[in-house]
Amino acid sequence: MNKLFEKPVEIEGVVYLASDFHLGIPDKAESRIREDHIVRWLEQTVLPDASHLFLLGDIFDFWFEYKHVVPRGYYRFFNALSQLKNKNVQLFYFTGNHDMWIKNYFIEEFNMRVFKQQQPFLINHTRYLIGHGDGLDPRDKGYLLLKKIFAFTPNIWLYGLLPSRVAFAVAQCMSRESRRHSSNPAMKKCRENESQINYAREVLKNEDIQYFIYGHCHCPAREKIASSATYINTGDWLSHRSYVRIEGNEVVLYDKDVAVL
Ligand SMILES: [Mn+2]
């Protein structure tokens, strides 16, 4: 296994992490209500004391940007991000499996750092491995192949040639299908937490990492997986409003602003 903890990004301060907002589903009205909750959290909780905000993927249920055009909507969310940027809060975006086609819009508009893969961090001198957390199970060959196809540059380019009306209709259809297949998700989700934990345990055989923080499962979780290592899942904003806050070496998982674990 390659050394994962080779070039950590070093940061210090008060850090917030959240994932899986899935903005855009199940319809405009419900997504707007969720967006309002997210904006309130960003303005009232994050903005007053954050130095860094991590968005750990699947922030949009679907995102595709053209050279001159981006999907309409999300104005309030973008406004909150821009307030954070103006206060010099550093924004990090990890692409998820639903929003892997992010190009440079967020970099240009919000000065974000975009990561397409998990990344080691040294946060307040503690060692973290952070990412969206999909495709970590090497036995999941079908999924990994699909991910490769979707991430293949010529395919993205070809997709970009479709008129946006057609491209977005195809995307909506795919998103609906994938939801239908995981429509009774409690079991499946916890299995995905399990595969993230198994992966983290594998990593710990060769590396000294104190926290693994992932999204993707929609299941907020915190589990001690070794004497000095903890696994955390940031949950989601579809059925929870969960996030992680780091100050010094205190790492707390919240749901609806209540410390849960
Ligand atoms: Mn995901």
Image: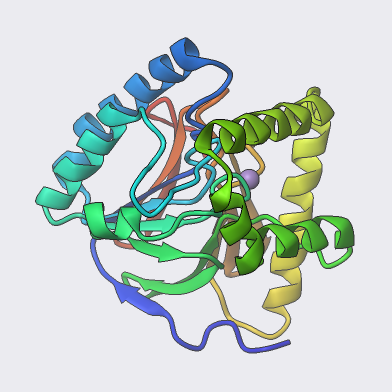
Image-quadrant location for residue 162: top right
Residue nearest the observer in this picture, 183 or 148? 148
Image-quadrant location for residue 198: bottom right
Going 83% across and 67% down the picture, which residue do you hit?
A: 138
Whether residue 54 can be seen here: yes
Image location of residue 66, percent across then percent down: 43, 50
Image location of residue 28, percent across then percent down: 47, 15
Image location of residue 179, percent across then percent down: 73, 28
- Ligand 1: image quarter: top right
Going 20% across and 30% down the picture, which residue do you hit?
A: 44
Q: Residue furthest left?
A: 87
Residue nearest the observer in this picture, 77 or 48? 77
Relative to 223, 109 lies left or right? left
Going 62% across and 88% down the picture, which residue do you hit?
A: 3
Q: Quadrant of the N terminus?
A: bottom right
Q: Which residue lies furthest to the top in this view?
A: 29
Relative to 146, 166 lies left or right? left
Residue nearest the observer in this picture, 47 or 60? 60
Residue nearest the observer in this picture, 11 or 61? 61
Relative to 225, 230 lies left or right? left
Considering only vertical position in the picture, is 197 above or below 30? below
Colour theme: rainbow
Instruction: Report the label total.
Output: 0
Going 33% across and 77% down the picture, which residue do you hit?
A: 10
Whether residue 247 can be seen here: no
Image-quadrant location for residue 121: bottom left
Image location of residue 105, percent across then percent down: 33, 54
